[in-house]
Image (cartoon, rainbow, N blue to C red):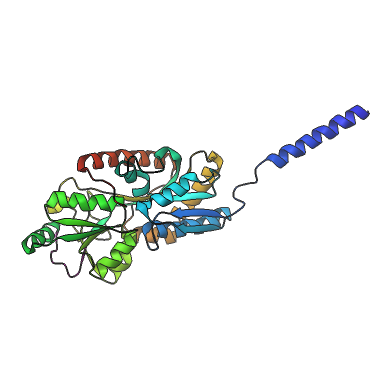
Amino acid sequence: MKRIASITFAAAAASCGLAAAQPAEFPNRPITIVVPFGAGSGSDVASRFYARSLKETLNANAVVELKPGAAGMLAGAQAARAAPDGYTVLMGSGTVNAANFPLFRGTIRYAPQDFVPVATIYVSPPVLFAAKSVPGASVGELASQARQAGRKLSCGSGNAVTQVACELLRRKTGADIVNVPYKGNGQSMTDLASGQIDIAFSDMAAAGPFLQRDAVRPVAVPAPQRLPSLPEVRTFAEQGVADFEFLSWNTIFVPAGTPPAVIRRLNDAARHMLGAPEWEKQRVSSSGYKVSGDLKEAETFVASELARWERYVAETGVKGSE
C-alpha cells in the first residue's frame, strides 16, 4: 500500500513538473513591431493598424519601434537576431526583405532564410511625383525640360525600391538624374513638397497627406494599370516608357524557428486587420491591392519578389546606397 502511494505521489509530482515546464500561452507579454522606416512611412502606418489588431484579437499590447536607417537594414538585422518566440515581429517590405539582398550582397547582415513570413498585408506600386515648381506634366516632359535647361533632376528615394526606380528612370529617359536617399518615403515627400528636391517615388500611404493638400504633383504609375485612386495619371507604359514596373509592399515576418502555432496566431491578427473597415478605408485611399493575408500566399509572394529583385539588380547594375 505504501509503495502504491509513493508511486502515485511520484506520478503526480512528475505531472506537475511537466505542467510547469509547458510554455505559457502566447502571448503573455507585449509584442514589439520593428519598423524599418520613419514616422509617416507606409510601414509605420501599417504597423499602427496591426498593433490595434493584436490587441483586439489576442489581447496583446504591442510596441511599435521605429528603426530607420541603412536602407532598413538596421531593423532587419535587429529582428533577425531576436528570439524566435513571436514577441518580435518585423514589418517587412520590398526593400528590407527583397531588394536589399542583391543590392548589398556581401555586406548585409541578415539573409532571406532568417525570416518566416506571417502575412502579406499591403501591395501597391509606388508613384512618381514632382514638385509643384518643376515644369513638365509627363515623364517625357520632365526629362526634356531638364535636358533643355542643362540641369540635373534630384530624385528622392526613401528605400531601396525607390532608389532603383530613380536609377532606372535615369537610364530609360537619358535625363541627368541624381538620387537623393532618405530614411523613409515620408521624409522624401516632405522635402519634395517644400521644393528641396525635384521628383520622388513614394508609396501612396506616405504620399497621401501631401496629395490631399495639393502639395505635390503625380506624374506616372509604374504598373500595368492605372490606379483607381489616381485615374487621370497614366502609367509609364502609356507614356512610352516600357518595362518599368515596381511594387511597394508590407509583409509581417518573424525570426526563423518561431513555433507554427505562434505564427498562426499572429496571422489571425493580420487577417482580422485586413477585414477591418478602418484598414479597408486606408487600403483604398493608399491604392493598395486587395490581399487575403493567407500564409501560403505570403510565402509564394515573397519568393517571387526575391527573384524579381535579383533580376532588376542584375539588369541595372545598381549598387545599394545607405
- Asked whether the viewer can see residue 111, the reply is yes
Q: Quadrant of residue 148?
A: bottom left
**Which residue is found at the position 51% from the left and 43% from the top?**
263
Q: Residue at x 20, y 43 (%)?
A: 316
Q: Position of residue 264 (x, y in %)?
A: 52, 43
The main secondary structure of the magenta stretch is loop
Q: Please give left or right for residue 265 compared with residue 22 in the image.
A: left
Residue 272 percent location from the top left of the image: 48, 53
Query: Is 1 left or right of 227, judged from the image as shown?
Result: right
- Judging depth in this view, the residue of 31 and 239 nearest the camera is 31
Relative placement, left or right, of 293 versus 176 is: right
Q: Position of residue 243 (x, y in %)?
A: 18, 45
Residue at left 26%, top 49%? 246
Q: Residue furthest right?
A: 1
User: Quadrant where the N terminus lies?
Assistant: top right
Camera-side residue of 11 and 281? 11
**In-front residue for pair 195/130:** 195
Q: Which residue range is magenta in the image? A: 130-138
Tell me residue 109's x, y (percent). Answer: 40, 43
Q: Farthest front residue?
A: 107
Does residue 311 sit above or below 274 in this rendering? Answer: above
Residue nearest the viewer, comparing 304 with 101: 101
Indicate whether residue 173 is drawn in magenta. no
